Image: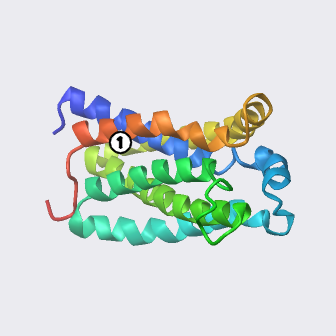
Amino acid sequence: PLTRPQLVGTLTGLVLALFLAALDQTIVGTAEPRIIADLSGFDRYPWVATVYLLTSTIAVPIFASLSDMYGRKPFFLVGAILFVVTSALCGAAGKMSFLPFDGMGQLILFRGLQGIGAGMVLGLIFTIIGDIFSPTERGSYQGLFASVFGLSSIFGPTLGGWLTDSVSWRACFLVNLPVGVIVVTTIYRRCRRYSARR
């Protein structure tokens, strides 16, 4: 059984990670007109959202299965770190002239990698909940996490529009960095190494 600090820390990290990964599916939508104007990629703008959803969907079953063999915590941390790093890269898209892609190509590439990180995180959140809680407790906590997912879907477009108008479309990605650092630190310090073979 987890100690109370471990339980609180793990749940806090999982809730924040779920909020970030779900928020990123909707926050970019309201910023796309500014992104297109800045990066001149109207013919490819649907890929900014599509590639994220595609790679995150593919990553969920792959890394959930691998975590059964090698443990949840390492894959969750790698996914969270990848998500944070690629968020910063998405925010810098178009400014890296050394890459062989234009600005929109860079953003699509980084969004695809960001989707892999999000898929790793999303695939393991509910699995870790199953590891922590008994079947009688699991339903209420899964309901809590599902409500966080729904809240982020409502909150995302509003936050994306406000950040785009007040700061820049790049802020829609950079806003993930401070919360992502909290998630990585909390899970690293508080979460146990869950696996099917423990």
- What residue do we see at 78% from left, 56% from top? 39
Residue 62 in picture, x, y percent from top left: 41, 72
What residue sits 23% from the left and 37% below the top?
A: 189
Residue 185 is situated, as x and y percent measured from the top left of the image, at 31, 37
Image location (x, y in percent) of residue 30: 79, 44
Closer to us: 105 or 188 = 105
Count of picture labels: 1
Looking at the image, what colour scheme do you see?
rainbow
Q: Is residue 165 above or below residue 58?
A: above
Q: Is residue 149 visible?
A: yes
Residue drawn at x 22%, y 54% as measured from the top left: 194
Vertical placement of 17 versus 158: above or below?
Answer: below
Q: Residues within 10 Å of mark 1 (few under 14, many from 20)?
A: many
Which secondary structure, mark 1?
helix
Q: Residue 75 is drawn in which quadrant? A: bottom left
Q: Quadrant of the N terminus?
A: top left
Q: Residue furthest front?
A: 98
Q: Nearer the viewer, residue 25 or 135?
A: 25
Residue at the image point whose x is 23% and y is 60% from the top: 71
Towards the viewer: 172 or 102: 102
Residue 89 spot, x, y in % from top left: 56, 53
Quadrant in which the C terminus is drawn: bottom left
Tell me if 179 is positioned left or right of 173 in this view. Answer: left
The amino acid sitting under disc 1 is Val
Q: Is residue 146 visible?
A: no
Q: For residue 102, what is the image quadrant?
A: bottom right
In the rendered view, does 129 fall on the left or right side of 152? left
Residue carrying label 1: 184
